[in-house]
Image (tube, helix red, strand yellow):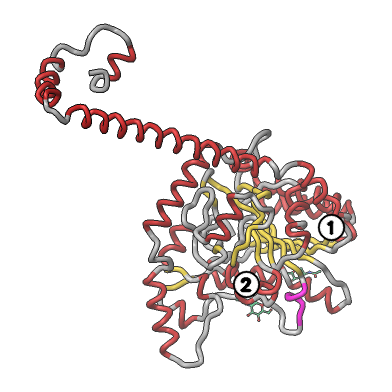
């Protein structure tokens, strides 16, 4: 009886509900008189005990797993960051940034972080290139303030404020190209840089940049931070591709589908191998950008875009970069930035790991289940079909950034042109 009414017994309060008692008694009494009842009962007991043991093991397994992941996450601490802050000084850094209607951010956070970085790195080793266009808020005033402060520090810079209003990817590619113009100009004057730092309109701290520049001890074709706008979801889904070139499995931790990228994320490696990323802040060696035929930002060929396909210029750049194969593209999960202060604080808690035990549990099991559900299908079949059609139309065609391509409808939904 005790197994039939476990609740009532545990509470230790009187007998089972009267309405149920006679029913279950009549139901079970005939069985109890059968000769095999003892074996049956024993088997049932065993079964429930097996279930209990399984449940216990499952809980223990999860506790252990969550404990280990939390330990990995906690290991990315100050010691690591301090070392990172001093190691790469002396390298020359070219900062490139686009702005549009983000005056509040510029005034309250961005300027301070950029000035702080220039101070920490050494004003003589930093050039700041900023291009703003068509803002109708106080972005221009904010950037004028930056111009003045950098001037006081003695930082070389080109802060361009323009009234042209620009959208869409070919324009964005052109704008990003524009922020690199001074890099070429300075090259022609014999002034070279080691790294380019692409700064999006994000909340960040000086030490975030220092840590990012030191990713994989400074050896990378690109190193990106992780960006968050609406935690716990990461933001730039448009450009992030795992080590196999696939889009995310889930928009929350641990994000990736490929074995390598996911393992690195779960283990909190300081450099998670990916094929493309552009999440918030990106550091890249300057060399390809000043080569004989310089690496530039581009959009998909028009003939391919005409099939309602789109790809981020920030993903294509990794496909085109000759260093990507050689040095690798990495996401550094120890550098997390936000598109607003609330998001920044959510992923940079004052103490303890930034992923909660519950998020770890959901992330690990969610990704196991999703990987099993989508085990056969990975890339978007609509995209694949259109790309194959395009390739077949003309024999000379190729697109090295095939892994960047998505169905155009997604672009409008995902990017919304809120950020540039
Ligand atoms: C990017 O810059 C290069 C060199 O300045 C230029 O040839 C190319 O057309 C630009 N791309 C876009 C999309 O504007
Ligand atoms: C600053 O950048 C703008 C936009 O690329 C360019 O037109 C201008 O010539 C640059 N100014 C200087 C002084 O180099």
The residue drawn where x is 29% and y is 7% is 13
Residue 117 placement (x, y as % from top left): 80, 51
Residue 315: image location, x then y, percent: 58, 68
Measure the alpha-carbon separation of dots 1 and 2: 24 Å
Residue at 51 percent across and 75 percent down: it is: 402
Q: Which residues are magenta?
A: 287-291
Q: Is 163 colored magenta in this rendering?
A: no
Figure quadrant of residue 47: top left
Q: Is residue 7 left or right of residue 256?
A: left
Vertical arrangement, residue 141 with respect to residue 8, above or below:
below
**Front: mark 1 or 2:** 1
Within 10 Å of disc 2 (Cα), the crowding (few <14, some 14-19, many 20+) is: many
Tell me the tag on residue 88.
Answer: 1
Name the residue located 47 percent from the left edge and 56 percent from the top edge: 249
Numbered label tally: 2
Ligand 1 - quadrant of the structure image: bottom right
Q: Nearer the viewer, residue 186 or 152?
A: 186
- Left or right: residue 28 versus residue 340 is left
């Amino acid at each position: 009886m005790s197994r039939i009414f476990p609740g009532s017994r545990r509470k230790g309060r009187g007998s089972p509900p009267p309405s149920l008692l006679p029913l279950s008694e009549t139901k079970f009494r005939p069985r109890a008189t059968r000769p095999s009842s003892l074996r049956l009962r024993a088997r049932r007991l065993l079964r429930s005990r097996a279930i209990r043991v399984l449940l216990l093991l499952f809980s223990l397994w999860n506790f252990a797993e969550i404990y280990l992941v939390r330990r990995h996450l906690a290991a990315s601490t100050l010691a690591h960051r301090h070392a990172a802050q001093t190691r790469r000084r002396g390298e020359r850094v070219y900062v490139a940034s686009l702005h549009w209607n983000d005056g509040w951010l510029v005034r309250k956070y961005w300027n301070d972080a950029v000035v702080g970085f220039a101070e920490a790195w050494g004003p003589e080793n930093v050039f700041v290139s900023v291009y703003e266009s068509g803002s109708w808020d106080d972005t221009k005033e904010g950037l004028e303030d930056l111009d003045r402060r950098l001037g006081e520090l003695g930082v070389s810079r080109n802060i361009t404020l323009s009234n042209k209003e620009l959208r869409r990817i070919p324009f964005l590619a052109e704008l990003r190209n524009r922020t690199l113009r001074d890099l070429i100009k300075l090259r022609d004057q014999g002034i070279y840089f080691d790294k380019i730092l692409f700064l999006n309109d994000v909340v960040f701290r000086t030490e975030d940049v220092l840590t990012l520049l030191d990713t994989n001890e400074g050896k990378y074709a690109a190193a990106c931070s992780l960006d968050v706008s609406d935690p716990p979801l990461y933001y730039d889904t448009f450009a992030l591709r795992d080590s196999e070139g696939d889009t995310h499995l889930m928009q929350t931790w641990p994000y990736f589908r490929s074995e390598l990228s996911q393992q690195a994320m779960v283990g909190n490696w300081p450099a998670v191998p990916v094929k493309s990323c552009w999440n918030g802040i990106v550091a890249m060696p300057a060399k390809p950008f000043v080569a004989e035929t310089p690496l530039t930002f581009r959009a998909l060929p028009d003939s391919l875009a005409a099939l309602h396909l789109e790809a981020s210029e920030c993903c294509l750049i990794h496909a085109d970069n000759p260093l990507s194969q050689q040095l690798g593209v990495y996401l550094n999960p120890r550098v997390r930035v936000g598109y607003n202060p609330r998001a920044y604080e959510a992923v940079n808690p004052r103490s303890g790991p930034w992923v909660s035990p519950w998020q770890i549990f959901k992330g690990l099991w969610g990704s196991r289940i999703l990987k099993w559900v989508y085990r056969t299908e990975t890339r978007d079949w609509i995209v694949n079909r259109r790309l194959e059609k395009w390739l077949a139309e003309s024999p000379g065609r190729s697109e090295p950034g095939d892994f960047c391509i998505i169905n155009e409808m997604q672009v409008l939904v995902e990017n919304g042109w809120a950020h540039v």
